[in-house]
Amino acid sequence: MNPYTGEVVGVAARATAAQALEVARAAGQFRCELAAYERADILSRCAELIERAAAEFARSICRESGLAYKDGTKEVSRAVAQLRFAAEEAKRITGEAISTDVTPTAGRRMAVAFREPVGTVLAITPFNRPLNQVVTKVAPAIAAGAGVIVKPSERTPLTATLFVRTLLGAGVPERMISLVTGDPITVGETLVTSGMVDMVTFTGSATVGRRIAQRAGMMRTAFELGDSGALIVLEDADLAAAAAEAAAGAFATSGQSCRGVKRILVQDTVADDFAALLRAAAERLRVGDPLDPATDIGTLIDERAAHAVDGRVREAVAGGARLLCGGRRAGAQYWPTVLDHVDRRCELVREETFGPCAPIVRVRDFEDALECVNDSRYGLQAGLFTQRLDYALHAARTLQVGTVVLNGGPQFESPNVPFGGVKDSGLGREGIRYAIQEMTRIKTLVL
Ligand code: NAD
């Protein structure tokens, strides 16, 4: 359903558990006979097809998720870039030759360690980027020569279906890619516990991630979970740049991004000026019909999600926060919201708030900011605005996160850098090259 209009925009199959198992059985038959250059060609062709159908993909994203068309087009370009980069990486999967004469017993042998695909990869994906979350898993799997079963979010199955059809059109062998849609437990859990998949790569909430981890047993797993993404702004920062980055990170995709800005830790001495800049940036954004190309902010995934965000904003205000703008809801839509003097213990910032909110938490100094970031169950990415390189180095060593971005926000992404978290933010790394490592295993031949 389109969360903006309430219209039905498409239908997807609601697979039974037996059907899911049938898919897993068939997928298990796949053995990759494609050479690296052939896998690369398929990925490049798929990128080209998506680029040609960019408007159709962007519309599909908007209609089923309520994301703004601007968000949709950005997502399509990211997906194309990931596919192109995966095509290059498919040709760079190498191993190493190891001489064994390090002990008297192994003797003068040569060991060759090489990578082979892990087998069948089950990719379970969330709603917040209906195309890119799928591409981010499927592209490295194909590059690695692994078969994939895609289990997209039941709330956004249509774009995933369109993508899988496009892959088949680009020449992916039928057995290499499957798609199962339906109820999360009936389909998702059946596949996880089937004993017929070799790896599960999951992106979604920490709660579901834990549940899957408990059921996955000895299977290889990768988890990309939530975050309470922090942006630190110190008194020597370029405040205009920091405010622009904070707005971009907090409001893109209606604030539904795992690497979005979820709390802004601003040094007291500059917090008034920063808050004014951020408020002005938020007020410039246009909330409206997701399909209108001029709209900056579409809807959240559904009305319940918007209610939940509103509840946390109200609780923060009751706890002493000052609402500078926003705090308004209509159906599944939520207006970009800036709050100042937010208590660092309130749920709005302690938990992951999946909505367009930019809460400012005031901090005394750099050390106070670092402590505040680390006092969280999450740790995905964090940003730091300062002119001081010694602070950047200290933050990189001290912060319990996967990535620290200097003079940028936690929203930073590029297909060639490792991406992933610590603590409840996950296990394993994405980024095409690193995901290929997770989706392959090392085998050794001793000569
Ligand atoms: P979710 O956890 O509700 O669902 C994610 C996927 O898991 C869906 O496909 C769902 O159908 C499936 N699922 C649910 N229960 C299952 C079960 N018992 N067994 C198997 N599969 C099951 O997450 P969501 O609401 O779709 O997405 C939002 C969450 O995803 C946020 O927490 C966000 O931070 C996180 N996320 C993380 C990243 C990252 O890379 N770290 C990226 C995007 C989103």
Image (spheres, rainbow, N blue to C red):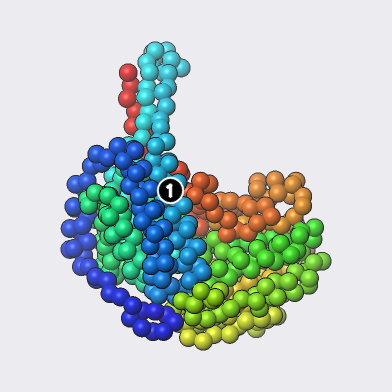
**Residue shown at the point (36%, 43%) measured from the top left:** 40
Q: Name the side, left or right, on which 429 lies relative to 351.
A: left
Q: Name the side, left or right, on which 319 lies relative to 48.
A: right
Q: Name the side, left or right, on which 432 lies relative to 196.
A: right
Identity, as a three-letter code, of the amino acid under mark 1: Arg
Which part of the image, by quadrant, shows the N terminus?
bottom left
Which part of the image, by quadrant, shows the C terminus?
top left
Per the image, label 1 sits on a secondary structure element best described as: helix
Image: 379 above or below 34: below
**Residue shown at the point (32%, 25%) measured from the top left:** 445
| Residue pointed to by mark 1 | 84
Q: Position of residue 168 (x, y in %)?
A: 27, 54
Q: How many marks?
A: 1
Name of the residue lying farthest toward the right:
269
Q: Compare residues 13 and 205 and report the one nearer the observer.
A: 13
Q: Is residue 351 visible?
A: no
